[in-house]
Image (cartoon, helix red, strand yellow):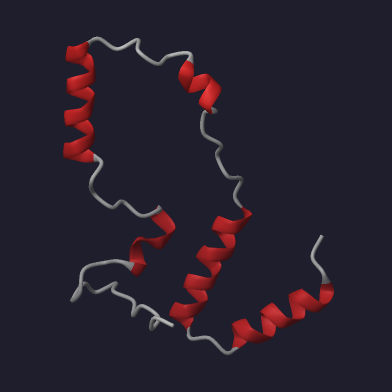
């Protein structure tokens, strides 16, 4: 249930934002409203600990090093981190 005072404040603040800032705000609110996925527990992971043979473990480590060291932001935020000069680049807020 939306609290009326909070809704009024959000709408008031939103009306003062540029269209691009409104898009960013909408993406943020959307992501906050989405259910968060929960990972496996330590107990679940311990049930499979030590089950990989050396070759499989090496292949997995190589795949992680090759593909997982890249930043892949959520789809809704990609427009915030486009390379400079991209037509969709959005200015990042200044650090506090």
- In depth, the one of 90 and 53 nearer the eye is 53
Give the side of residue 31 with respect to residue 1, left or right: left
Residue 40 percent coordinates (x, y): 52, 28
Decide if residue 17 is on the left or right side of residue 62.
Answer: right
Position of the C terminus by quadrant: bottom left
In percent of width and height, residue 2 lies at: 79, 65
Residues 96 and 70: in front is 96
Numbered circles on residues, count: 0
Residue at the bottom extreme?
Answer: 16
**Image position of 54 with respect to 32: above or below:** above
**Residue visible at 81% across and 78% down in the picture:** 5
Residue under the image location 20 percent in, 74 percent down: 84
Q: Residue 82: x, y in percent?
A: 26, 67
33 lies left or right of 18: right
Quadrant of residue 68 within the rendered picture: top left
- The answer to whether 46 is drawn above or below residue 10 in the figure is above
At horizontal 83% and vertical 74% (from top left) the residue drawn is 4
Image quadrant in which you'd find residue 43: top right
Q: Position of residue 56 (x, y in %)?
A: 22, 15
Viewer-proximal residue among 23 and 47? 47
Which residue: 47% across, 18% down? Answer: 46
Compared to residue 75, the image places residue 24 above or below, namely: below
Quadrant that contains the N terminus: bottom right
């Amino acid at each position: 249930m939306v609290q009326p005072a909070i809704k009024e404040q959000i709408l008031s603040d939103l009306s003062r934002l540029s269209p691009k800032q409104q898009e960013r705000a909408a993406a943020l609110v959307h992501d906050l409203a989405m259910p968060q996925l929960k990972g496996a527990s330590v107990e679940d992971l311990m049930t499979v600990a030590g089950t990989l043979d050396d070759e499989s473990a090496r292949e997995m480590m190589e795949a992680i090093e090759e593909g997982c060291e890249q930043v892949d932001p959520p789809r809704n935020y990609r427009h915030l981190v486009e390379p400079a000069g991209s037509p969709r680049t959005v200015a990042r807020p200044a650090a506090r």
